[in-house]
Image (cartoon, rainbow, N blue to C red):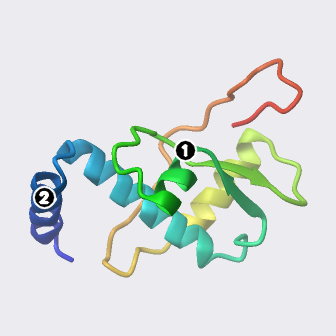
């Protein structure tokens, strides 16, 4: 898909579904990240959870999530390690030729028993 084709698809999907074009694009890109994870050697380590997963399963198309929630099995993670894993997963372009990259890794839920990045 060329950039123009993607832009046209997002516009058409936004009009068809009455969903903001930015949300359509964000969802599309998050799905591409999930596709790259599923094709990686880490696919058995990721356990998906949260709003994006539920929305994908039951079709809640207006979910405004901006992230993918996951637990990592059989891995101890630091910010540096998760950054390296995602850089490795995303290093090759998607089938459409898109290059995805990690722009930021932040700690979340600091102080919780199960903190995250």
Q: Label 1 belongs to which residue?
A: 51
Q: Which mark is residue 16?
A: 2
Residue 80: x and y in percent read 72, 44
Q: At x 59% / y 79%, what residue is drawn?
A: 39
In the rendered image, the quadrant that contains the C terminus is top right
> Looking at the image, which is closer to me, 39 or 50?
50
Picture quarter containing residue 111?
Answer: top right
Picture quarter containing residue 96?
Answer: bottom left
Q: At x 68% / y 27%, what residue is drawn?
A: 108
Residue 115: x and y in percent read 79, 30
Residue 65: x and y in percent read 45, 39
Q: At x 41% / y 74%, what residue is drawn?
A: 93
> Looking at the image, which is closer to me, 13 or 9?
13
Q: Secondary structure at mark 2?
A: helix
In the rendered image, the quadrant that contains the N terminus is bottom left
Q: CA distance from mark 1 to mark 2?
A: 23 Å
């Amino acid at each position: 898909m060329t950039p123009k084709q993607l832009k046209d698809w997002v516009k058409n999907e936004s009009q068809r579904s009455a969903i903001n074009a930015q949300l359509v694009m964000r969802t599309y890109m998050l799905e591409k990240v999930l596709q790259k994870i599923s094709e990686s050697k880490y696919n058995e380590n990721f356990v998906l959870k949260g709003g994006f997963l539920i929305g994908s399963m039951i079709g809640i198309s207006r979910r405004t999530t901006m992230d993918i929630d996951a637990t990592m099995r059989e891995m101890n993670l630091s910010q540096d390690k998760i950054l390296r894993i995602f850089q490795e997963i995303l290093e090759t372009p998607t089938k459409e030729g898109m290059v995805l990259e990690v722009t930021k890794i932040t700690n979340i839920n600091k102080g919780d028993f199960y903190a995250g990045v």
